[in-house]
Image: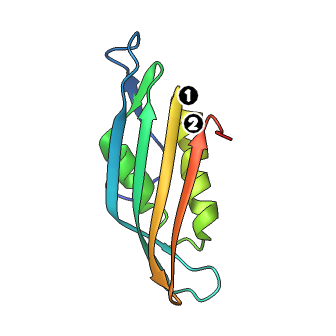
């Protein structure tokens, strides 16, 4: 397995596809770059999903999240991109990604993206 950032998300078969259950991940060391200033943005990314037929492999998730380290992205865009990529790789029954970003310019940002969309 590579030891460099990658946008590839590896999967494995869900061991209990007939049951709804949640899998939760928390990455308190997520980093991307502000597209306006080039300064680093720090966040905790929280992922909760109910798997369908596939689950995400943890090392690939770690390398995937690491791949944003030097990329300029607005908080809203990066949170939704993570959700989109998880949906494409896993086809989960439900998925939520929370981007809990540290204070920048005196403002703390929390972005919540869900699948399927909730009103």
Q: On screen, 45 above or below 93?
A: below
75 with respect to 42 (left or right): right
Categorize mark 2 by other alpha carbons within 10 Å: few (<14), some (14-19), many (20+).
Answer: some
Residue located at (65% from left, 85% from top) = 36
For the residues labelled 2 and 1, say whether their Cβ atoms are less than 8 Å apart.
Answer: yes
Front residue of this view, candidates 7 and 3: 7
Q: Residue at x 31, y 16 (%)?
A: 15
Classify residue 36 as left or right of residue 52.
right
Q: Is residue 46 above or below residue 110?
A: above
Can residue 96 be seen in this snapshot?
yes
Q: Could you say which quadrant of the image residue 112 lies in?
A: bottom right
**Residue holding disc 2:** 87
**Residue visible at 33% across and 46% down in the picture:** 25
Depth order, front residue of 114/4:
114
Which residue has dot 1 on it? Answer: 91
Query: 70 or 119, which is in the foreground?
Result: 119
- In the image, taking residue 28 as reference, residue 118 lies left or right, namely right
Q: Position of residue 46 (x, y in %)?
A: 40, 52
Front residue (pair 76, 33): 76
Q: Is any atom of residue 1 visible in this view? A: no
Image coords of residue 78 (percent x, y): 58, 61
State the quadrant of the C terminus: top right
């Amino acid at each position: 397995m590579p030891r460099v950032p990658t946008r590839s998300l590896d999967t494995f078969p869900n061991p209990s596809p007939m049951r709804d259950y949640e899998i939760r991940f928390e990455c308190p060391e997520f980093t991307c770059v502000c597209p306006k200033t080039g300064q680093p943005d720090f966040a905790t990314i929280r992922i909760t999903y109910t798997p369908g037929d596939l689950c995400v492999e943890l090392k690939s998730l770690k390398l995937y999240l690491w791949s944003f380290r030097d990329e300029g992205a607005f908080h809203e865009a990066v949170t939704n991109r993570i959700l989109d990529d998880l949906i494409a790789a896993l086809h989960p029954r439900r998925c939520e990604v929370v981007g809990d970003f540290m204070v920048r310019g005196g403002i703390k940002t929390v972005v919540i993206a869900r699948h399927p969309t909730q009103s």
